[in-house]
Amino acid sequence: MKKSILSFILLLYVFSINAQTKLPAYLDLNQPIEVRIKDALSRMTLEEKVGLCTAESKFSTHGVPRLGIPELWMSDGPHGIRMEIMWDSWNHAGWTNDSCTAFPALTCLAASWNPEMAHLYGKSIGEEARYRHKDVLLGPGVNIYRTPLNGRNFEYFGEDPYLTSKMVVPYIQGVQANGVSACIKHYMLNNQEKWRGNIDVELSDRALHEIYLPAFKAAVTKGKVWSVMGSYNKIRGQYACENELTLMKILKGEWGFDGCVISDWGAAHDTKNAALNGLDIEMGSWTNGFSSNRANAYKNYYLADPYLKMLQSGEIPVSNVDEKAARILRLIFRTAMNQNKPFGSFAGPDHFDVCRRISEQGIVLLKNSAGLLPIDKSRYKTIAIIGENATRSLTEGGGSSELKPKYEISSLQGLTEKFGADKIKYAMGYASGKVEYDKVNPSPYDAAIIRKEAVDLAAKSDLVIFVGGLNKNSQQDCEGADRITYSLPFEQNELISELLKVNKNVILVMLSGNAYEMPWISKATTLVQAWYGGSESGHAIANVLSGNVNPSGKLPFTFGVKLGDYGSHSFGIIAYPGDSIKEIYKEDILVGYRWFDTKKIKPLFPFGYGLSYTTFSYGKPSLSSSSMTATDSITVSVKVKNTGKVDGFEIVQMYITDEKSSLPRPEKELKGFQKIWLSPGEEKRVNFTIKKDALSFFDDKKHEWVAEPGTFKVLIGASSADIRGTEKFTLNELH
Ligand code: BGC
């Protein structure tokens, strides 16, 4: 036979094999995702579609086994990949290969004011999720810091919607580049833990749109997040997971969200409301699917058999489940069935390095008036390290963000490595109880005895480093309950006051995710806010205290002098914590510095504040034009110079003030920031672009964002209270 005939027969053979084995469209990666979804749906029974909508274990959903469509596996979030949890209970599964990298808490990331760090964080945690075969990372959280009592503030990005939005978008992009979905939470108005399961939040449209929605909106419209977690609380009378306004109108309507709404664990309450008002996947309603208690079976979830029955009877149209199943398939194709995702990696040196760098960039130097920092090691023969937080694990506890890290460097360890074991002595000074979710355990120590021991040690040491703050116990920085006081716990104020009396060289290093009262502040010369730094916390702290790293973090929320100084605590219990049924956000749009500035209340430390080991001078800001219209923009330009002796980052901030407006506006609002690196003597020009959105407010009558023509001020500063230059410009009417 001729060669050409032979090859033709071969080709026919190959074609025929291909024809026989042709992939169904939903498995064909060359097909557009929407075609694949449509094809999969056309092959599924009603029962299979309904099956997609609920959990089949604590952290997984049903797939469609008959079609080879796998389940979704989820994991907390947001600071590391949580240890494996038992199939049907909250108990730890006791695996030995799930010890992760504990990344810094999100308040620390926020304090870095560095979107590049947020991207690196997302990329790295996404790689860990991927390695552990997780499809959905339950985080990050972007609830706004409304009260310093909220037990979960450490899991969020602080009080400002602009800063939060800028940080969350790169985090999401980093995670999702791994074929792992970020799940932005807790949507929404879950701004406290007390009564989180039922409290009904009432607030104005302005507060909703100007303060609480923007970070979620940025996550959806800019970050293109693939899933959103509905919260426990009610919003204007309806549960957040069954909320027509926030889920149907805003999220899926106005923002065009094409992903899945996943309930917080146990946040669904009613089949019809959940089905019709936007919930796609119901998780954690109850467990024990395999116990003798049949009533607790997964099949009895609101979106399981009860939902199927309503679809079969016609009470709910079948189009409703088609829509949900399409969203869930989209999520599965983007994650579990994504053939192009990388393999990921887990708890390796590169991730620990990321952890240390973010932790270092988030540490905020609040006070350094005696020049104790950076520590000149040659000046001290003896260093006393005091405080329980210097040795305590702060990745354990806290609720669902608890982690089992491969390692966690304590402050004592980091400081001992840095300054030498021969110089260092440790005393606990104060003590809390064993960490437990939902329960406050008493300390096993006699407070007076351990305090005296620490004060005696401090008195005879050359330098004292106190490491205290909050911890992850219930009623501290922990899910499920709020703090009960603004004060530091475990009699730390008494201890700190005594330390300050017996030694003039005291450095206070505070680890927390929240602000607290500082009755001793006028006596303290040196204060560092070091958050929860995760695995590399102790190294990061030691690097900053020693001067190997110049601190560059700035506060993502205001430290008030006292609790009553916060807007949320200025209107009685109805504004916080509510009357157990309802809560009204009476401070309205004046959250955080917006309240302190507008009401002229001097904070202890303002939003955006943080010192450095070097100094920066700011030039006079200049504007590209003295006027603009709603369709163009103005560039603000300012020169910033490192006038000190060491390299360092400065975070240059831009705030806008509306001089006159038809509706009340805050004194000023953050609308731009840049973190720049400068060597000694170096000067850089920083540019900000001002567009209409930086000038707008939400007009609740017109129900739209409005920029009113008139005069505006642009303020360039090193913090919200340290404005270095101001210029005016006008927004002209469009003709
Ligand atoms: C928390 C969520 C968490 C979920 C799963 C809930 O109690 O509010 O943030 O992702 O549990 O652990």
Image: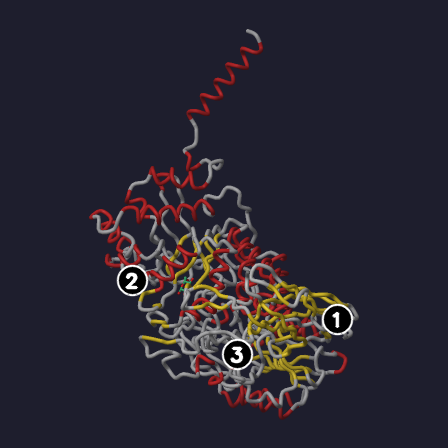
Q: Residue 585: give x, y in percent of width and height.
A: 40, 76
The residue that disc 1 covers is 641
Which residue is located at x 62 percent, y 90 percent? 523
Helix, strand or loop at mark 2: loop
* Image: 696 above or below 128: below
Q: Is residue 96 left or right of residue 423?
A: left
Foreground mark, 3 or 1, reads 1
Which residue is located at x 32 percent, y 77 percent? 580
Asked if marks 1 and 2 touch (Cβ < 8 Å), the reply is no
- Inter-mark Cα distance, 3 to 2: 34 Å
* Kind of residue sitting beneath label 3: Ala
Sequence order check, earlier mark of 3 and 2:
2
Label 2 crowd (10 A; few <14 / some 14-19 / many >=20)? some
Foreground mark, 1 or 2, reads 1
Helix, strand or loop at mark 1: strand
Sequence order check, earlier mark of 3 and 1:
3
Q: Residue 67: give x, y in percent of width and height.
A: 37, 38
Q: Is residue 42 left or right of residue 466?
A: left
The residue that disc 2 covers is 269
* Kind of residue sitting beneath label 1: Lys
Q: Nearer the viewer, residue 107 or 429?
A: 107
Asked if marks 3 and 2 touch (Cβ < 8 Å), the reply is no
Helix, strand or loop at mark 3: loop
Q: Quarter holding the C terminus?
A: bottom right
* Kind of residue sitting beneath label 2: His
Q: Is residue 321 left or right of residue 150?
A: left
Using the rendered image of the protein, determine whether residue 695 is visible from the camera's viewpoint: yes
The residue that disc 3 covers is 515
- Inter-mark Cα distance, 3 to 1: 31 Å
Which residue is located at x 41 percent, y 50 percent? 72
